[in-house]
Each structure stands twice: as structure tokens, then as C-alpha cells.
Image (spheres, coloured by chain):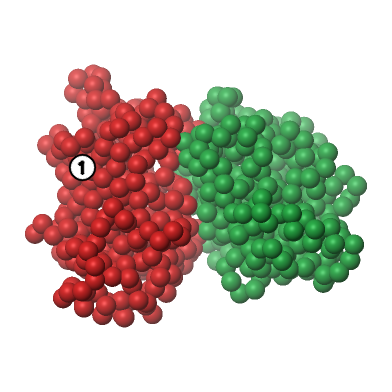
Chain colours: A green, B red
Amino acid sequence: MKFATLANGTPDGRLHLVSRDLTRAIPAEAAATLQALIEDWDNLAPSLQAQYDALNTGGGVAFDPASALAPLPRAWQWLDGSAYASHGELMAKVFGIDNHADKTRPLMYQGLSDQFLAPTADVALPTEDDGIDFEGEFGVICDAVPMGTDTAQAAGHIRLVVQINDWSLRTVAPIEMRTGFGWVQAKPACSMAPVAVTPDELGASWRDARVDLPLIVDWNGERFGAASGYDMAFGFDQLVAHAARTRRLVAGTVIGSGTVSNDNYREVGSSCIAERRGIEMLDHGAAKTAFMTFGETVRMECRAADGTPMFGAIDQRVVKG
Amino acid sequence: MKFATLANGTPDGRLHLVSRDLTRAIPAEAAATLQALIEDWDNLAPSLQAQYDALNTGGGVAFDPASALAPLPRAWQWLDGSAYASHGELMAKVFGIDNHADKTRPLMYQGLSDQFLAPTADVALPTEDDGIDFEGEFGVICDAVPMGTDTAQAAGHIRLVVQINDWSLRTVAPIEMRTGFGWVQAKPACSMAPVAVTPDELGASWRDARVDLPLIVDWNGERFGAASGYDMAFGFDQLVAHAARTRRLVAGTVIGSGTVSNDNYREVGSSCIAERRGIEMLDHGAAKTAFMTFGETVRMECRAADGTPMFGAIDQRVVKG
């Protein structure tokens, strides 16, 4: 199934089913919001599946991503990993930090979840001096996960897969990292692509609890990266289990992969500016690519191997807030 | 005004006004939940004030803290400071970390907010090996705070003051701190004392956006600490402004002080075991006080200078989860 949330003047919007090709949408009959669905997934999913199957044969109205909110416009919890070793090791090398030393534990931070920005909304930030950067990544939305859930059980709690832009302010980030307390100012609200999909929609590209598809990132209309989502050192099942070791996860918890990155980043490109700058520092001794300025845009999209749209596109402009 | 949320089978419970002496309660007429109130404070507060004034002359039913949830049983955002320099400097000295080097920036982490435990609920945690510790602190609940709000403006967004136990797992904490990503496993759900109060209830003890009253902490029935809440290096107004520099704060955001601590901790005691252990390490070269074991209890209470109950008591037992 594929879901979008259309604006209706409420904070949680109105849940819609979207046809597999993302051309048509229809209000979900069984659940008014994605949060309501995720809280009662097993009961509500069968009738939604029937409605979705019917939609794929016809009906509904034209789906306009510009009227879409984030599929989950606000969540009770957002925990973002940093699961791509190629990214982590590069950042550690360039900035002289040793936070990737322990390979047995995923890196994860708790981020703000009261707001996921709509996929085409302008992103208002206070100043260009903060080092405005994007981070293209994938994420999952879980139903209720009991404390102590192991990796095998965790896989069954992954109900939806999403695509995320984890906006980051790079000038602030190292200052906050040094405290050990994690990021507050450096991590404003994230954005979500318009469509959340059940893992089965990914077919064979949902592999080892990872998205085995490239994330296409265009900055100001130019190709910036096309790294595969597969290369996570920990799958989403492991990230969910890690998060649930000392807490239950409330239904609707969103878990992120961290910025998508591959070992051959010089060939496939990157999903954030910081990584490109890191490569430049390695290769040339200094970063030459500047962070974003107001008015610039970033677009992120992931399609199935056969070209079928998957999550729709994040396509945003940063503006002065 | 004083507010409690009584269990009614829903996640957000039912908002009640509580008499100043915490003996009687009555359902709040103008708002069913604290979240609904905080989202529309200016419109709803006047009639609630009238209802509260009437309650203080009589009426209502007996207030039973055992039936109380946290005043805000779940919040869209929880950001916890570490604003007591005496605590931070001790921890930095003992553990050889330099995160208090920059005195111009508050320390703050983003914690899990989907659940604040009820004040008398058992606290279920997976293992004693994690180093179970309490952290007695104060907090504030804000209405909607625009991005870029300054300290002077931030003071006006502080609508309620609360008392919190920020449960901490000390064996995990340094492992997560070293990553720079902040705490996930080390910070399970916090607890809240049963009553949230408007700042005016604190009278002269609400001073410089700080709670100028001692927080009485008893561990297994023995006095452990009675440090004053006043000694914050940054007031709650500054913490709110810090949090809002690059994000808007959603109505109902909870901001914490961090574990209450005073320079004369050898005399007044501490609000967490880690601090006592730190003092022991300084004084004797090694910590001798162990962390909590299952079945142990902690009680935290703050009263006005004249003995009037303020927030009621957190009184909890840790159990195997």
C-alpha cells in the first residue's frame, strides 16, 4: 500500500491511499490519519488493502504532491541513526572524532518529531551562517514496539518505509557534538517525501530490512548524488531493536537511516553537502563546496528499479525564517 | 492555578484543577486536557482562573495523587537542560570531559516525550546492570514559541512549572556521550510530579525564571538531597530561547533544568546518585554508593517556604521490565 496525507486544516491532515504509480488518490476509509492507522494496524490494514487494490484498477482523483503534507505530519518520536559506515568513517577521519570506534552499536540521536515538513514546503531557517545542509535518507514507521524487542521481532513492527530530508546546520553541529548531549539547534525539523509505502511495495528492493535502491539527490537542479540505500551497517530491524532496548516505542515512532552513503562516494556522489566537503578535504586539503544559501533548492527522489515512482519527491527551497 | 491530570482510560487523561493545598480537585471546565489548554492558553485561562479561585473556597472532591497521571502524560517535545554548574563541573572533573568549557551556551539534549510516567507508577527497566539512577529536577511547559524568540520574550511563554524525575542509565550514558549523538538508551521515560503550577503559585520563589525552593529527595526513605532549584547558570527563559533559536517550539514543549545541584553539595546533598558518586570519587578516590536495584524507591517533593505542598510528590519504585 501507498499512503499520503493531504492538507485539510488539521495538524494531522487526512490520510489517503495513493495508486502505485502515484497518479491518483482516495481518502482512506478505515483510518482518518496515519497515526490512527499505525495505532491499530492489524485491524485496519486488511480493508485498506482491499481499497488500495481497487484504486489501482481505477477511481480516485488526481494525486497532487503539492497538496501533500508529510505522510506523518507529526510523530511522538523520531530517532535517527547514522548507519552508513562510509559516511561515518569519512566524517570521523576528517573531523578527528572517534565516534565510529565501536562497530557493535548503531549511532542514533533523538530528534524533534512534533513537525515533519511537507515535501514541497519552503524551509525557513534563521541564518545562512549556520551552514545549511540537507541529508537524504530513508526511514521506517513502526507500530507499538515493546521494550526489549529483539532484531527478529523488530522486523515485524516495521509497517511503513519513508524518505526523509534531515535538515542539518553544520556550523552548530560540532559545537553541540562536543558536549556529548547531541543536537538541538543543529537539527531543525526534517521533511518527508509525500508517500509512505508498505515494505512489500519495494519488492526485492526491500532486502535485509534495507532499501536497495538509489536515492537521487539534485541540488539546484544539478545531480549531486545517487547512492544506494542498501549499504547500512545496521538494518532498520537492528535500529528498531537498538532503540527499544530500554524503552517501549510508541506506535508511529519514526526511525531514520542517517544520510545515505556508499563506499564509492566519489563515483555515486553524496546525500549531504558535508560529505562532499569531507571528500574535498581529504583530496585537496580544504573544502570548496559551500553550504546552502537562501533561495537554493534540493530535490530528492527514489524510484523502483523499473522506474515506478516510490515515495514521490522532496523538492524544497530554503528561505530566511 | 494548579493542575493535575487524572486517569480516564485515554492517553491524555482528564485535566483537573487542584486546590492550592492539593486536597481537592475538580474537572477543568474550559479544557479537557492539558495539551488542549496549552494550545489555547490565553483564551482558556481566565475562566479556569475563576474556577480555580472558587475551588480554593470549597467544593470539588478529594484529590488522590495515586490516581494522577503526569500532568502532561505525553508531550510533542521534551528538551532537557543541564543548567546547574556545580553538577556539570563536578561531572566534567570526575569523568574528564570538557563539555562545560563553553559557559555561554546551555547544555541541552532532546529526550523521549511520548510518555511521562505517572508520579506513583512503578518504573520498569530492563536490567540493574545499566546503572539505574534518578535525576530530580524542575521543568516548564511552554505555549507555542516562534523560532528566534529572545530571552525576554521567552519568559512570557512559560505557562506552567513542573517537577520531574529524569530517569538515567549511567552505565550506558558515557558510551552514548562519546558518540556526540546524545542519549537514547541511557534516557528512558521521565516521571512528573502530579501537579503543574502557574509561575504565580510560586510567589517570590519564582525568581529570575528559576524555582527558588529546595527539592527534597529521599532514597529508600532516607534523605538524599535538599538542593535549591535556584542555582541554574541559565534561567528557564534562557533555556527556552536557546531551544527556539533554529526551530519553533510546539505548544506543550517541556523544558527541563537538569538535575538540581548546589555548590555546597556536600552539605545539601544531591538530586542524583551519579553526583554523590562523583563526590566520593573526588574525596575518596572511588565511588562507594551503588546505583538502584529493583524494588528500591525514590521520593521527590518540593514545598513552598511556608510548607504548602507545591507539585505533590514523585514516589516511585523501580522494577524489572
Q: Say which amino acid is labelled 1.
A: Val
What x and y, as percent, mark residue B212? 18, 55
Residue lying at the far top in this picture: please name it: B285
Nearest to the observer: residue A75 or residue A147: A147
The reply to whether residue B263 is visible in this rendering is no
What x and y, as percent, mark residue B164? 31, 50
Quarter of the image that includes the N terminus of chain B: bottom left
The reply to whether residue A182 is visible in this rendering is yes
What x and y, as percent, mark residue A138? 69, 45
What x and y, as percent, mark residue B247? 50, 60
Q: Is residue A152 left or right of residue A182?
A: right
- Vertical placement of residue B315 versus B44, above or below: above
Q: Is residue B64 left or right of residue B112?
A: left
Residue found at x 76% / y 65%: A65
Residue found at x 35% / y 51%: B118
Q: What element does badge 1 sit on?
A: strand
Quarter of the image that includes the C terminus of chain B: top left
* Residue annotated with mark 1: B217
